[in-house]
Structures are given as C-alpha cells and as structure tokens.
Amino acid sequence: MSVAARANETLGRRRNILGNARLAHFDVCIIGSGAGGGSAAHVLTAAGQNVLILETGHNPWGDLDRPGELPPPLQSNDELKYGVREYLDPQALLEPRTFRTQPNATAAVRDDVNSLPKAVGGAFQHADSKTPRYNVVDFELKSRIEKLIGETPGLSVPGFGADAGSANFADWPFDYAELEPYYVAAERLYGVQGSLEDPFASWRSAPFPMPPGVPMYLALLLAEGARQTQLSGGPLHPFPFPASITSRFYEGRPPCVDCGFCSGFGCPSHAKGTPAVTTLRRALLSGHCQLRANATVVELVNDGGHVTALHYADGDGVIHEQRADAFVLAASPIESARLCLLSPTPAGGALGNSSGQVGRNLMFHHQTLVSGFTPQRLHGQRGKAVSDGLSDFRGVEPGGDAFRVVPTAAGRSLFLGGIVEFSASQGLPITDDGGPIAFDLPRGVGFRFGLSLKNALLDGAISQHLIAMQMQGEDAPQLGNRVDLDPSVRDLLGLPVPRITYRPHAYELSSRRFYEPTMKQVIANAGGSQTFIDPCETLLGDPPTSRHIMGTLRMGSDPSSSVVNPDGRFHDVDNLFACDGSVFPTSSGYNPTLTIFAVALRIAHRMVGTVPGP
Amino acid sequence: LREPLLDRRTFLRGAAATAAAAGTLGLGLRCDFPGFFSDTEFATLEALCDRLLPPDRDPGAAALGVPRYIEGLLTAFDRLHPQIFAGGPYSGRTPFPDYQNGTPSRRHPSNRFRRFLAMSPRQELFWRAELFGAVAAGLPAHLGQQRGGVLRGLRSIYPEGLARLDERAQTLHGQPFAGLDTALQDTLLQQLDAPGALPLEPVRDRTFLDIAIQHTLEGCFSAPEYGGNRDGRGWRMISIEGDSQPLGYSLFSRAIGGYREREGHPMSTPNADELGPDGQLVPRPLSADGLRIQTRIGNLTGFLDQVIPGACQ
C-alpha cells in the first residue's frame, strides 16, 4: 500500500465503517447502499434484523451515523468536482464496460456505458430526484394490450399480438393497488413534493407530503407553450414534476434553495431526499446496521441453492469472506446481474440462473431530446434542473387505467412513450458550453479555441439559451438486450467486465417518431427556434445515454421465465433476494426511482412479515 | 518522466508530524509548494493559454490564472490531501438564508472548498495514473492494453508538449512561442490543430492541444479554490453566479409560509437586464459567433439525418 493510501486510510477509517461497528453476526447482508439497499435496510433494521451493507463506492456524506442533526456533507456546488472529475462516479479506466448493438459482434470498450455513480447512498444522489409513480396499466401491460388487440379491429402494437415474438413483455406479479401503500410509504420516507395537476397520474390514497417549490422560468415558458399545443384534439397538460426535494422543513431537512447544482451533483443542504439522508441514515442510527464503504463484492459462495458467504475486496484489493443468513442484491441491474454471473455453482452454471434469464430483458428508458434556442437567457443555473413536465405522451387515458387508441394510416395503434421533463442547459460553462463547442461538435462546426470560442462562452450560446424537452419513453424488454461477461476485457481486480448488448425495438422507436412533431411544436410555442432532435444514440452505434436502468433479474411467478419470485426471492436460491431496478418486468415511461423505493420496501417488509406504518 | 519535486515519503512524514503537532491532522492542510514548470515552460504555457482563450475587453486565460490552475493539478499530490476534489458543503461566498424573513442573513459559512478531500483508494490510483502515468502509479497493465496503449502522465505530457511548441516556433520563426506576435501564434496553433499534426496520446485519444484546451476551460470557470478563475472573474465575465449554496435563489420564509425569490437573481422570471420599461422582453443580442454556433447545431442534426436515415427523426 502506498504511503498516501495508508494516510488516507487512517484519516478515512472512521468514515469507511458507519453504524454499529461491534455487530458480529448478520441476519442479512445487502450489496449496495442506494435506492434498493437503503430502503430495504431501513425496513429490516426497524424489524430488529442485524444488517450489513457492503458499498463499493466511497462515502461523500460524513458521519451519517451520528445522532442529532444531519452532518455537513462533502457535497458542493462544484462543476469541476462532479461534471469533469466525476467525484461520485466509477473511473472508466479502472472499471470498463463494453458495448455492442449486434449479438454476434465484438463489443468495444466504451468510456461511458450507462454508468451510475458508485458512492454511499447510491446513484440517486446525482439525480435531480424526480419521483413520479407508474400507472395502473403498467403492472398488467402485457395482458391488457393483448386483450385490447383481441377486442379492437385494426389495432396493432409493435411487440404485441402477431409481433409478440419480437419482444418479451410480461405482467408484473402484483398490481398497482398492491404497491400503492408502498408508494405512500416511499413518498413519506424520502419526502416528495408534488401537485395533483397531472391528469394521467393514477389514484393515490394519500396526498403529497409537500407542495411544489418555485417553478423555473424556462419551465413556465414550456408550460405555456404546451398549453397552446394540441394532441388528440385537446391541449397538453403541464404540471409541477413530483420530486423528493423539500419545499418545506421536513424531518430535519431544510427547504430547497434552488441552488441549480442538482442534476449531476450531490446536494450540500440535504434538501434532496436521497437514501443517505433518509432511509440509510435511519438504518445506521438503529444500532442494527453496519455499513462498509469501498467494499466490492466479487463472488457469492454457494452450493447451487443456498449462499453460504460472499467474498469482497476492500479498497486495497484484499479479499475478505463475509457470512450472513440471507443476502440481498441491490447493486443496480448491470452489477447485480454481473455478480450472479461471477458466482459459479458446483454444477458449473451461474448462480440463480436455472431459468437462463439472468442478465436478459435489460431496459433503459428511450430518451427523446428535442431542443431549440431562445433569444433571451434562461438562467437554467437557478432551479432544480426540472421543475415541470407533462405526461400526455405516456399514451394513456386520464387516470392511467386505460390506453389511448390512436388512428394511424395502417389502422390503429398505441404509442406508449413516457413522461416529459421541461429542461434546459444548467448554465454550466465547462460542460454545457466549453466541452460541446470545443470537442463534441465536429471540426468546422464547433470552435476549437480563440476569440470565437470565448464569444460563444460569453453569450452562453448553449448554456443560457438551449431550451429542451426530454421524453423518458418506455423501452420494450427483449431477450437479446442483456448483460453478460465480456470474454476478454477485465477490470482493476482482474474480473470480467459487464458486456452490454442493446438495440432499440420498434415499440419505442414508433413512439419516438409519433411524439416528436408535437415536441417540436411545444418548443416553438415556447419561443425556441433552430429546433432540433438529438440523434438516437443506438442508431449511431453508441450506448444509450439513459441512466434509468431496469431488468436483468425479472420478477415473476413462473420459475422458467423469471429469476426472482413476486417477493424478490430467487426461485432457485433459498436465501438470495434482489430489490433494485433489476426485478422490473417492464420499464413504464416514468422515472423509475420511486418505484424502486416502493418495490424494495415491499420486498423487505415481506422478508420480515411487517407492513408499512400509518 | 518527472519525479515529484519533493520525495513524497519524506514530505508526508514531515507534514503529518507538523499537523499532529498542531493538532489538526485530518483537517486538510494546505501548504504552498514550489511550482512544477521552469520559468521558460511557464512563459510558453501562459502564451499558449492566452491564445486558447484570448484577452480582449475581458481577461484572457493567463489573467484568469489558468497556468496556475494547471500547475496546481500537476502538483496535486504534493499536498497531504491531493488538490483534486475540493471540499464541501460551502465556499462562504454566499450567506445562510434567514428562514424567518426569506432574505439573506448576515451569517456566512466558513470556506470548506479549501479543504481538499481525502480520496478513496480507487480515486487515488486513477489520479496518480492520470498525473504520473500508468507505470509509475502501478496500474495493472491490462487496463491500458485493452485500450490499446500505456497511459502517460500529464506531468510528462505538458513539458513535452510545451517543448514541441517552442521547437516548432524556433524552426519556423526563430523564436520561442511566447516571443511570437499573436497572429503568428494563432497560425501555428491552427497548424498544430490539424488532424494528424500532433500525436494522439495513447488511451486518452487526445492530443496535447486537446488537453490544454480542456484545462484552459477548467481553469477559467472552475471554483477559485482550484487555482484558476481568479477572484471569480471568469464567472463574472460570463454573467453567472458560480456556487450559490447555502443561499441559493429561492428563500423560504416562515413569516409568509412560502418562498421569496432572491433579489437580482430571478428564478421564475427573465433576467432584469432583458426586460424593457413596460416589462416586455428585450433580449440581449448574441455575438455573431454565438448565433453561428446555434445555427450550426441546428443544421448538424439535419445533416446527420441524411447520413444515417432516421437517426434524428
């Protein structure tokens, strides 16, 4: 170990182990401290279980286990630290991933394949905390659409009916009503602001814990533009975006001040309701929880049907064995699936993979980004990054309990896109203006250096004037879209890296094409000109830019077509669970984290036989 | 490859002893160390940065402190806590809000940006490789091989790149780069920027000039604690506020049970300097360069759509 590493270890030891350091026997070991792991740890420790959390990332939060006020975090309004030097992210050089669009091609090392931050508290801390719910129809998408096709002459939907073999849609093993109490619990635990203005939101049994905060100027422009834009014979319906961000004093957290360093940054004031300052902290204060940071799990030791222990590498690469009675995967879909594939069974297969489904049905949201430029400055550096949006493009009827059938040239179809975020550049000079103008644009299009570059920076040509809408379109599950182990590329520890194989399906591409003209119209009505659509990355051979990652350990009742059962337990491993986005059978068209919270809360409650409190 | 100016082991021992004696171990010492560049190299670097982001009525990269920023990066590990990640949560540039009235208070937090953060083992390994190169950092060889080469450190790339720039200037014009007039400097840089004129750094896939452009942008507009953006002039020049916590822009008031917007920094309305006397919008005109970049971006996607049908539809 280097001198500096040793010095860092001495200084950092206090923060590398959080919670009750004296615990010796663990009922449950959770891999990952983010949205799934934090939610589960809270429920399990509240029920008296002793829980060990292993987190591969570092701790940017200080002494989360100190009672009393929340500690000052190491997070800050610092473009260099987050946007350039990637304080929260894994280093692609040390932890590469490979990507390909065709199943038989050799996958290439790509610097940025859907990587999520790795740090205590998980990836949600880098998000701007948007927390819409899924709709009623989302939990029964497969059976409801097939039924509708049977009842409706001329109705065809890519991936369904006669085309069902091209995709792998499935119902969730429970319905919206079953999950609704857990949505309520999640909204309270994480502290969600929102309004009842979204007509397409499904029913709720409790109000939002907080009202919406202050809208951004650019959001008001786009909301007005949307009200002037018609779809299916009526105007669009903008509303304040639900987000787990305080707009009032809430459980020891102050109201958000709209500092602007939201999407892509950690919150310095604890206004963002992320796992670290909510569920994870409750678990750490319970006396029943210990968290080890910089602990990378490399293998689950098993006899094929039972996990006896796991091996993890500490920050110096030293391997440790850890035992527990049960194990929970919450490392996010790519890494949770990879860990199963890195864990051989005595019979020679991969752990939990008797269905052959581990790693399959990998889904991202299909993001459609339509932009324009306004003559006036939009000062996107003030605000939550996204304060308003619309869900007219989800393609459901009001209440989200039925589909909107649309006449087409060929007959009738459904266009199940997704929620739209009213967006803009965040006013960041290095990453919004400098990087794109000097590097990302082709030669002859951008300005490499000199007074032209300076003039564009002084104008904030992109960072102050770009106005945008981003749709989080539903991504069809496909067997061939998957994570497996790359045959030749290895990470810092010498382990095979995740290989991502992904190509879009006509299901999401048709929705993209259907809504794009309306999106362009909204931008124009909001005062944007030079309207343009970002290219679909996968058609250019690039990984999707989406950081909404779902699937790979599908949840279902049938052990031959799913990996975990409706309670998150592996069909074929009696003490192994998954409680992150990997269990989602379908992706819906809404930001997934609130649903990850709710699903993880449900799985954890069912592990210990409790229910959410009132 | 350059050795650190001070042997790390000796330095750390000394610093740790000093800190322990002062009872401040772990609070993030900040010591001033001798620089990295020779005077000649520094002069070339200043001249280079000032052509990448030139002075006009506003300061250029040199006046904004970019060379010092780059030197701070290259010597990051000469400090007990490497000068890579500034601390948090606040810089002290704005005060705490007064939650009773929804106004700025008079209470400022202390500057924690100055206390650079201890790094995780992976962060440290990565940044050592970035500065000293893969071999010196002890990076496993396969990580470079699978990206087609061996990562070289910035502490090698900069002196070599600056020397190459001076050599070229000497050959063509008989003077070092810093001695040329700005028109000749610009011409030389344009030649070096042509594809293939400078070698691509292995693993990084960037030339020395690419790296210098990136660092110039960083040094102009990153938080002043990193050594550039002198006195926040980079931010003022482009009319942005920089870090705004803990005050922010929306100030909650218990007295009114809701938010007030911060005076002079509106959230939900246009900037005051773009409003006419009757409240109508009067946009500040963009430069020809700003308009050109917007138009070119708009046209670019149309072009892509022709090359790859459907890509942008």
Image (cartoon, coloured by chain):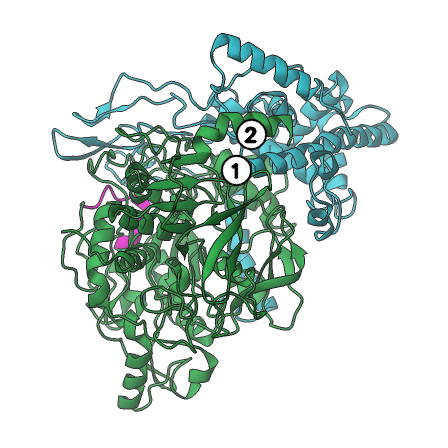
Chain colours: A green, B cyan
**A327 relative position to B214: left or right:** left
> Where residue A544 sits in the image (x, y, percent)?
51, 60
Count of numbered circles in the view: 2
Quarter of the image with the N terminus of chain A in it: top right
Residue drawn at x 71%, y 22% is B4
Q: Secondary structure at mark 2?
A: loop
| A62 is higher (above) or lower (below) than B94 | below
Classed neighbour count for the residue bearing mark 2: other residues with Cα under 10 Å, few (<14), some (14–19), many (≥20): many
Q: Are marks 1 and 2 in contact (CB under 8 Å)?
A: no
> Where residue A574 sits in the image (x, y, percent)?
40, 65
> Where residue B299 sits in the image (x, y, percent)?
54, 58
Spatial CA span between label 1 and label 2: 16 Å
| A54 is higher (above) or lower (below) than B298 | above
Q: What segment carries the magenta color?
A: A211-223
Q: Secondary structure at mark 1?
A: helix
Disc number for residue A430: 1
Q: Nearer the viewer, residue A497 or A131?
A: A497
| B48 is higher (above) or lower (below) than A551 | above
Q: Which residue is mark 2?
A: B84
**A247 relative position to A531: left or right:** left
Whether marks 1 and 2 lie on the same chain: no
Work out whether residue B4 can be spotted. yes
Q: Please name which of the two marks, 1 or 2, marks the residue nearer to the observer.
A: 2
- Is residue B219 found inside the magenta-colored segment of the image? no
Question: Amino acid under label 1?
Answer: Ile
**A284 relative position to B257: left or right:** right
Q: Nearer the viewer, residue B82 or A393?
A: B82
> Where residue A76 sits in the image (x, y, percent)?
41, 32
